[in-house]
Image (spheres, helix red, strand yellow):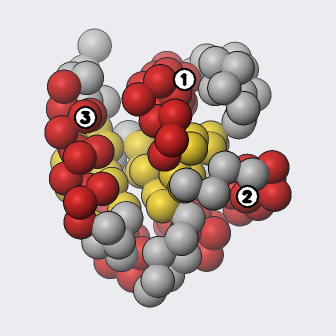
């Protein structure tokens, strides 16, 4: 089985660094990081990752606007919305925009890897159901 490749999209450089280190310890290959939504589509096309992790509250292009653009450009990419704003409204909006799953940054250490595996391995659970931590 080949390694899972991930693109990180977040306008917080500290979060990008920490998330990259966390994922690398989980044997996930971070093929790229981008500090804003405006560059994410071009980078995703060039790198062709299995999954894009997208922050919902970026200042240049919010994740809720980026997700449908990325989905239209790369229909097969897995998309996980990441946010500190863990509310039902944000969850529903992210999934409606085209995200495959939604993970709170507060529970990322528990929920992110199972969400990535679910998307890349075709788990039968519904989007947004990440191990009961909803």
Q: Which-is-in-front pick, marks 1 and 2?
A: 2
Q: Earlier in the sequence, mark 3 or mark 2?
A: 3
Residue beneath the point at 29% across and 72% down: 35
Q: Quadrant of the C terminus?
A: top right
Which structural element holds mark 1?
helix
Q: Which residue is mark 2?
A: 90
Residue beneath the point at 81% across and 57% down: 89
Left-right relation of 7 to 18: right
Residue neighbourhood size for the residue with mark 2, other residues' Cα within 10 Å, grouped as few (<14), some (14–19), many (≥20): some
Left-right relation of 53 to 92: left
Q: Earlier in the sequence, mark 1 or mark 3?
A: 3
Q: Position of residue 15 (x, y in %)?
A: 30, 56
Q: Which mark is residue 118?
A: 1
Tell me whether circle 1 and circle 3 mark residues in contact (CB < 8 Å): no
Q: Quadrant of the N terminus?
A: top left
Residue beneath the point at 29% across and 45% down: 19
Q: In this orientation, which residue lies closer to the viewer: 99 or 58?
A: 58
Q: Is residue 96 visible?
A: no
Tell me whether circle 1 and circle 2 mark residues in contact (CB < 8 Å): no
Q: In this orientation, which residue lies closer to the viewer: 119 or 14?
A: 14
Q: Which mark is residue 22?
A: 3
Left-right relation of 127 to 49: right
Q: Position of residue 46 (x, y in %)?
A: 24, 63
Q: Disc 1 to disc 2, how far (Cα)?
A: 20 Å
């Amino acid at each position: 089985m080949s390694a899972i490749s991930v693109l990180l999209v977040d306008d917080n450089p500290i979060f990008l660094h920490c998330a990259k280190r966390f994922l690398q310890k989980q044997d996930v290959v971070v093929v790229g990081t981008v500090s804003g939504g405006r560059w994410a589509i071009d980078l995703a096309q060039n790198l062709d990752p299995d999954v894009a992790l997208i922050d919902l509250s970026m200042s240049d292009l919010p994740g809720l606007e980026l997700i449908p653009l990325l989905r239209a450009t790369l229909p097969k990419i897995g998309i996980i919305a990441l946010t500190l704003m863990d509310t039902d409204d944000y969850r529903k909006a992210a999934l409606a925009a085209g995200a495959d799953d939604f993970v709170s940054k507060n529970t990322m250490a528990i929920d992110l890897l199972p969400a990535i595996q679910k998307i890349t391995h075709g788990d039968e659970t519904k989007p947004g159901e990440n191990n009961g931590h909803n």
